Amino acid sequence: MGLFDFIKNVGANVFGAGKEEAKAIEEMLNKDLAGKITNLKADFKDGVVTLSGVCDSIATREKAILLAGNVKGVAKVVADNLTAPATDKEQVLDYYEVKPGDSLSKIAKKYYGNAMKYPVIFEANREVIKNPDLIYPGQKLRIPKI
């Protein structure tokens, strides 16, 4: 489970102003997941981000992959060397790729049978979604089991 596909032309725009791509991704992850990944290293080539480092939890690893993948210009994330503690007891999650016309309420209805459970999805993706009313097609989200 080390290669994750994303849609290259959608996502946050963190590249620009002459900033080196790998450095921009590292800065974004260090900002959004402050203190949760040690020895973080990102490489970027031909739309592929390769991440390495040690995460404090499986949830942090998943969030780092999603954050890096939901960057405009990124098509794949390789995370074979991005590790998390083996003793972590966190639940395995589903992943969902946002489609045109989706909302968090619609996704919550699909997974939980109740549209009003959308805050569960929002909270699980806070680093990726800044506003629960702003999601976009192609974005990948963590869907926790409840």
Image (tube, rainbow, N blue to C red):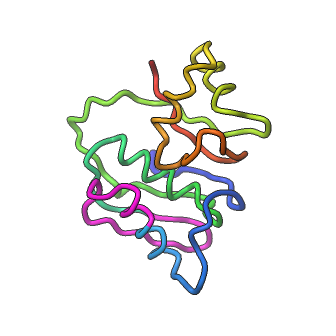
Residue 51, above or below 88? below
Q: Nearer the viewer, residue 4 or 142?
A: 142
Q: Left or right: where does residue 66 sit relative to residue 72? A: left
Task: Tally the numbered discs.
Answer: 0
> Residue 98: x percent and y percent?
68, 39
Residue drawn at the location 60% of the way across and 79% of the way down:
16
Q: Is residue 61 above or below residue 20?
A: above
What residue is shown at x 57% (from left), y 86% (from top)?
A: 18
Q: Examine the rendered structure and indicate whether residue 23 appears above or below residue 1.
A: below
Q: Report whether 29 appears left or right of 95.
A: left
Residue 40 rendering spot, x and y as whole percentages? 32, 65
Magenta range? 28-50
93 falls in the magenta region:
no
Residue 1's place in the image compared with 10, above or below, is above
Work out which quarter of the rendered image holds the N terminus and state it: top left
Q: Nearer the viewer, residue 30 or 49?
A: 30
Question: What residue appears at the point 23 percent right and 43 percent down from the top-left corner?
Answer: 85
Judged from this view, the residue extending furthest toward the left is 87
Q: Residue at x 61, y 14 (%)?
A: 114
Residue furthest bottom in the image: 18
| Coordinates of residue 70 in the picture (x, y in percent) | 58, 55
Q: Tell whether position 45 is magenta.
A: yes
Horizontal and vertical percent position of residue 129: 55, 46
Res. 146 image quadrant: top left
Quadrant location of residue 35? bottom left
